[in-house]
Amino acid sequence: MKNVYVHFPFCRSKCSYCALKSRSGSTPDERKTYIEKVAAGLEAVASPIDTLYFGGGSPALCDLRQLKAPIAGLLGGRTEFTVELHPLDVTDRKLDELASIGVNRISMGVQSLDDATLKAMGRPYTANEALKAFMKIRERFSNCGIDLIAGYPSDRSDYSRLREWPLDHISVYSLILEPGARLSNSKNNLSFPSDDETMDAIGSITGILETMGLERYEISNYAKPGFECRHNLAVWFGEDYIGIGNGAHGRTGLVRTDSGNESFVDAKTDRVERTIFRLRTRYGLDTALFPEWRETLDRFAEEGLLSKSGMVYFLTPRGREVCDTILAELV
Ligand code: SF4
């Protein structure tokens, strides 16, 4: 079983909150050269894989038809092939291109349902335009979802409007400002919501999504049954994954890669990394391999942050708000 992530570091424009390895202003020649490198990376994988994920950046800025041959060698009957799209990428022509190379899952970055916030983020479309783009995707693909960010300064999104979106999947991330993001430089002049206000917004989104049949299967991810992102589940459940492209991470055995550069971890670190993120999922953290974690986890359970079934621990609603603190105590 193999999972492959390909990073496309090109963007239409740089979003205010983003510190990822991506940039605007690329030329067609740069993108063509990059695609040739990606093609070589995909050819080296050379066997059917379980999941393929094109993220970025905006993968659709590249002509992905150039990857058709190497991709064809990787897709089996059950391969999940996801591409992230920007709402402005959504044209009939681009959707044809994606369908022609075997894409069967689309994740569109919407980020806010408030037009003023989209403008402040540097995302040049309105919420209605994003919905229109999503409906176009919906007509062509049977597995599609969106991303939102909660906690952006002065965001007045009316999340009840999510009911207008026929979603299979949605990721809702709290705003985390990393150094290098444009917003980090101007943050003193802005009014950020408190952590409690952001948690309240996520709580109300969760309630609305439940009425739409989307279950929270990971702290930041919700899906209709059967539409969970298999690529991300593979990563959280400790499977190997190959990373191709600038800024892509990979994990094979004890080898870790970052933009193609290799490093090694010891066997214990490897086992911890492959196990610990299960706590973020609704499937829980099985401590069979880590009995030494139980004393700490039992303490969090007594505080009402975890529940327990045999050796498996699950986050409670309160625990979800402090998951990073719990994980930090285990490593
Ligand atoms: S959020 Fe996405 S589209 Fe915006 S700058 Fe970052 S990588 Fe590019």
Image: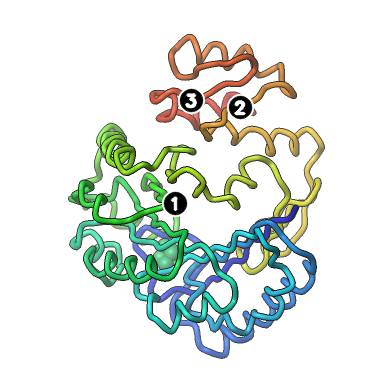
Numbered disc in front, either 2 or 1? 2
Name the residue at 55% across, 69% down.
103
Q: Which residue lies furthest to the bottom in this view?
A: 29
**Of 266 and 166, the residue lying toward us:** 166
Which amino acid type is marked by label 1? Glu
Please, what secondary structure does the residue beneath circle 1 have? loop
Q: Which residue is drawn at 59% across and 63% down?
A: 81
Tell me the residue at 43%/84% (across/down): 93
Q: Which mark is residue 285?
A: 2
* Three-letter amino acid code of the residue under disc 2: Leu
Q: Quadrant of ligand 1?
A: bottom left
Query: Which residue is under mark 3?
Result: 315
Callout in the foreground (1, 3): 3
Mark 2: secondary structure: strand
**Residue beneath disc 1:** 178
The colour scheme used to paint the residues is rainbow
Question: How far apart in space, not on screen, are marks 3 and 2 (Cα)?
Answer: 9 Å
